[in-house]
Amino acid sequence: MNTENCSSSIRFRLSISAEEYLSYYQGSAQVVVARSEDNRTIRFPASAIRKFVTRDGIFGDFEIFFDENNKLIEIRSIA
């Protein structure tokens, strides 16, 4: 995805076990709620982090990019 048109971004950390992610995968949970580095609460579709799932779950630091209308553009893993 292209982040040229992004208005802003927020960094956050995820720690979701494989068992916990199963509820997202099965559709019983559709939104991920996380706390940003600057202590804001952010919400985004669970499908946006599907590419980061490992057999252990999803763990690490991420950055979410969104446009001026707060529409999700992309989520990237921060190495």
Image: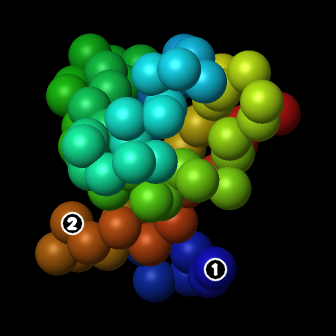
Between 15 and 61, which is closer to the camera in this rendering? 15
Residue corresponding to mark 1 = 1
Q: Quadrant of residue 70?
A: bottom left
Q: Is 44 left, or right, of 9 in this rendering?
A: left
Q: Amino acid at mark 1?
A: Met
Image location (x, y in percent) of residue 47: 45, 59
* Residue 36 visible from this viewpoint: yes
Residue found 62% across the figure and 82% down from its top: 2
Q: Quadrant of residue 60?
A: top right
Residue found 45% across the figure and 22% down from its top: 20
Between 77 and 46, which is closer to the camera in this rendering? 46
Badge 2 density bin: few <14, some 14–19, many ≥20, Cα 10 Å: few
Q: Amino acid at mark 2?
A: Asn
* CA separation in Å, label 1 and label 2: 16 Å
In the image, is residue 5 above or below residue 58? below
Residue corresponding to mark 2 = 70
Counting labels gives: 2
Image location (x, y in percent) of residue 72: 35, 67
Q: Which part of the image, by quadrant, shows the C terminus?
A: top right
In the image, is residue 48 above or below residue 64? below
Residue found 26% across the figure and 72% down from its top: 71
* Residue 9 visible from this viewpoint: no
Residue found 46% across the figure and 48% down from its top: 25
In the image, is residue 13 above or below residue 7? above
Between 26 and 8, which is closer to the camera in this rendering? 26
Badge 1 density bin: few <14, some 14–19, many ≥20, Cα 10 Å: few
